[in-house]
Image: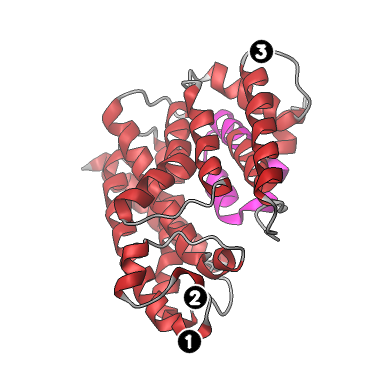
């Protein structure tokens, strides 16, 4: 029998992220279904706050309206986690996996705390400051995924957090111009100042080369977190390790595309083509096998 919640969430991940959907296809069916439900709730929350659809078409909005939507998300999520009836399959899904996999109930709310930083228009002075934001909007998602995969030890959970942080650095680097056009600047302000770029001029075409240097520096820091995460992937069950390794290499390859383009990185959206994804999935399989043999 088809599970209506899982089917609904599967469609969301396939529409929202081809990279994540392809990596999720490698998972054990039960874990794959849980990952769909986690992703769908995260995607829904992000879309609702930013007034977008499946991560696209971000529109600026009044902070008051965003704050009201955030409060609604908090309330409905809390009701769902308490076992109370709620509308919305994504809320039913997140409640189900939090209960089934013993995910600490604070974690979904930590993600909403990250969205509150966006609603407040917070900016980040240095990388350590930015890292706090990355934890809340992505690192904690990695931690929740690790719980779904049966991981409970703190060192491996920390490596899962590192992978989420690294992926968020990639997201920030890819979306610099789109974010700047709606008034959001995630690049460390101190780094921009060193390049002589005022935050209000990040999207100025005349500043592209300088911004590219800041982004390259940010991607280098992200690579440190990707490498740290690699040590945790080996502790996952085989299919989970392969899937997460595939996501890791596909996502980090987006950073390679951005670096190669330099100041032209944002002329068109950076992505990894289908053929390249298949190659990276094969590469991830090889590394996963070798990691079991070593």
| Res. 201 in view | yes
| Quarter where residue 8 is shown | top right
Residue highlighted by disc 3: 83
Tell me if residue 46 comes above or below residue 41 in the rendering. below
Q: Nearer the viewer, residue 83 or 30?
A: 83
Q: Which of these two is toward me, 286 or 223? A: 223
Residues at marks 3 and 1, CA–CA distance in whole angstroms: 53 Å
Q: Nearer the viewer, mark 3 or mark 1?
A: 1
The picture quadrant where one finds residue 80 is: top right
| Residue at (62, 27) in percent of width and height | 94
24 is within the stretch colored magenta: yes
Count neighbours of disc 3 (C-alpha within 10 A) and say few if under 14, some if 14 to 19, many if 20 or more. Answer: few
Q: Position of residue 40 (x, y in %)?
A: 65, 39
Q: Do the numbered discs 2 and 1 sit on residues whose CB atoms are within 8 Å? A: yes
Residue 291 screen position, x and y as percent: 27, 44
Label 1 SS: helix
Q: Nearer the viewer, mark 3 or mark 2?
A: 2
How many residues crowd around disc 2 within 10 Å: few (fewer than 14), some, or many (20 or more)?
some
What range of the chain is rendered magenta?
10-37
Which numbered dot is residue 206? Answer: 1
Q: How is the image coloured?
A: secondary structure
In the figure, is residue 93 to the left or right of 104?
right
Report the residue at 46% width, 51% height from top.
247
Q: Report if the CB atoms under discs 3 and 1 are less than 8 Å apart.
A: no
- 104 over 31 or under it: above or below: above
Measure the C-alpha gap from mark 3 to mark 2.
47 Å
């Amino acid at each position: 029998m088809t599970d209506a919640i899982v089917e609904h969430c599967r469609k969301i991940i396939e529409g929202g992220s081809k990279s994540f959907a392809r990596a999720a296809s490698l998972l054990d069916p039960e874990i794959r279904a849980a990952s769909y439900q986690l992703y769908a709730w995260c995607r829904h929350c992000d879309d609702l706050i930013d007034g977008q659809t499946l991560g696209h078409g971000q529109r600026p909005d009044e902070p008051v309206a965003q704050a009201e939507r955030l409060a609604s998300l908090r309330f409905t999520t809390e009701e769902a986690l308490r076992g109370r009836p709620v509308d919305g399959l994504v809320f039913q899904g997140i409640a189900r996996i939090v209960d089934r996999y013993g995910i600490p109930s604070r974690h979904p709310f930590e993600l909403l705390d990250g969205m509150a930083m966006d609603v407040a228009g917070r900016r980040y002075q240095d990388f350590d400051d930015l890292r706090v934001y990355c934890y809340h909007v992505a690192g904690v998602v990695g931690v929740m995924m690790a719980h779904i995969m049966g991981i409970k030890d703190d060192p491996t959970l920390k490596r899962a957090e590192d992978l989420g942080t690294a992926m968020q650095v990639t997201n920030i680097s890819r979306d610099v111009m789109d974010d700047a056009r709606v008034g959001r600047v995630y690049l460390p302000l101190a780094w921009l100042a060193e390049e002589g770029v005022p935050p209000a001029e990040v999207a100025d075409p005349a500043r592209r080369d300088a911004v590219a240097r800041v982004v390259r520096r940010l991607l280098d820091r992200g690579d440190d977190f990707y490498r740290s995460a690699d040590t945790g992937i080996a502790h996952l069950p085989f299919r989970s390790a392969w899937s997460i390794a595939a996501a890791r290499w596909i996502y980090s390859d987006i950073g390679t595309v951005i670096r190669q383009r330099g100041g032209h990185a944002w002329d068109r959206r950076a992505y990894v083509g289908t053929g390249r994804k298949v190659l990276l999935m094969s590469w991830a399989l090889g590394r996963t096998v070798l990691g079991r043999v070593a």
